[in-house]
Image (cartoon, rainbow, N blue to C red):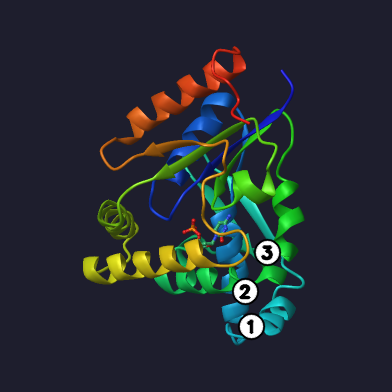
Amino acid sequence: MKPFVITIDGPSGAGKGSLALRVAKALGFHILDSGAIYRLAALKALKSGADLQDEQGVLDAIRDLDIRFERGDELTIPYLDGVDVSNDIRSEQTASAASIIAAYPLVRERLLQLQRDFFQPPGLVADGRDMGTTVFPDAKIKIFLHASAEERAKRRYKQLKSMGIEANMADLLREIEERDERDRNRAVSPLVPASDAIIVDSSMMDLDQVFDLVMQHIEDVNAGRAPVID
Ligand code: DC
């Protein structure tokens, strides 16, 4: 079969990352965690002391962005300038910074080709906000995964705790709502489902259920049973 792209877009904490890893593993596909790319760029900007409110300053800071990912069995390890920054990029400070710099058109443009280069045979599972709308508009399969803000705050809380990072539920909920607001309302590549995406609400579903539903959809599309929506 010709290599193809599966995009999984949605707000933070909807379960895109876990779903993407599982689908990629099941199909033997490559994986692109585009949020991690924005987080790495944000971390680079923070480390170089750039003023996050200054688009040109941020752009200068990420001009020579040295990033790579090492794929483990269960998780992907991100490196910035040769250093494992798994914990740093998951902090709320980096998440907020990522959301700020992600609103800059020139930053998005700078990171576009870098993301497209992840599409290699036998295929790619790409997760983010604009995978189906901007980065891979011709993707064969597009999923838009969402869940209520409360449910997502709960999941993030558990995830941070398990990584040994202190967290507060009320703060997390507020930060998630602020980030949603910024991601949805920015002028460039806002968080909206592609017109040809299937929309999945994971609020009341666990990962197994979402995974089964998505794998069934992929099978149906590949077998010509489900229409590719135009
Ligand atoms: O998915 P995440 O929480 O790791 O993403 C971090 C931030 O990066 C998020 O606030 C929005 C931004 N982002 C984006 O604008 N476009 C993407 N494709 C992925 C992430």
- Asked whether the viewer can see residue 89, the reply is no
Q: Report the disc number at residue 108.
A: 3
Q: Give the x, y percent position of residue 122.
A: 70, 28
Q: Identify which residue is drawn at 64% across, 72% down.
A: 104
Residue neighbourhood size for the residue with mark 3, other residues' Cα within 10 Å, grouped as few (<14), some (14–19), many (≥20): some
Q: What whole-number distance in Å separates the C-alpha atoms at marks 2 and 3? A: 15 Å
Labelled pair 1, 2 in contact (Cβ < 8 Å):
yes
Q: Is residue 220 above or below residue 79?
A: above
Who comes first in sequence, dot 2 or dot 3?
A: 2
Please state which of the two labelled residues, at mark 2 or mark 3, is closer to the viewer. Answer: 3
Q: Identify which residue is drawn at 63% across, 83% down.
A: 48
- Type of amino acid under label 3: Arg
Q: Which of 48 and 229 is in front in this view?
A: 229
- Type of amino acid under label 2: Lys
Query: What is the quadrant of residue 64 in the picture?
Result: bottom right
- Type of amino acid under label 1: Ser
* Quarter of the figure with the C terminus: top right
Q: Which of 165 and 173 is in front in this view?
A: 173
Q: How many labels does the image show?
A: 3
Is label 3 within 8 A of ligand 1 (CB to nearest ligand atom)? Answer: yes
Label 2, on which residue?
A: 44
Residue neighbourhood size for the residue with mark 2, other residues' Cα within 10 Å, grouped as few (<14), some (14–19), many (≥20): many
Tell me the SS state at disc 2: helix
Q: Identify which residue is drawn at 70% across, 44% down.
A: 118
On the rendered structure, is 191 left or right of 173?
right
Q: Is residue 5 above or below residue 178?
A: above
Q: Report the disc number at residue 48.
A: 1
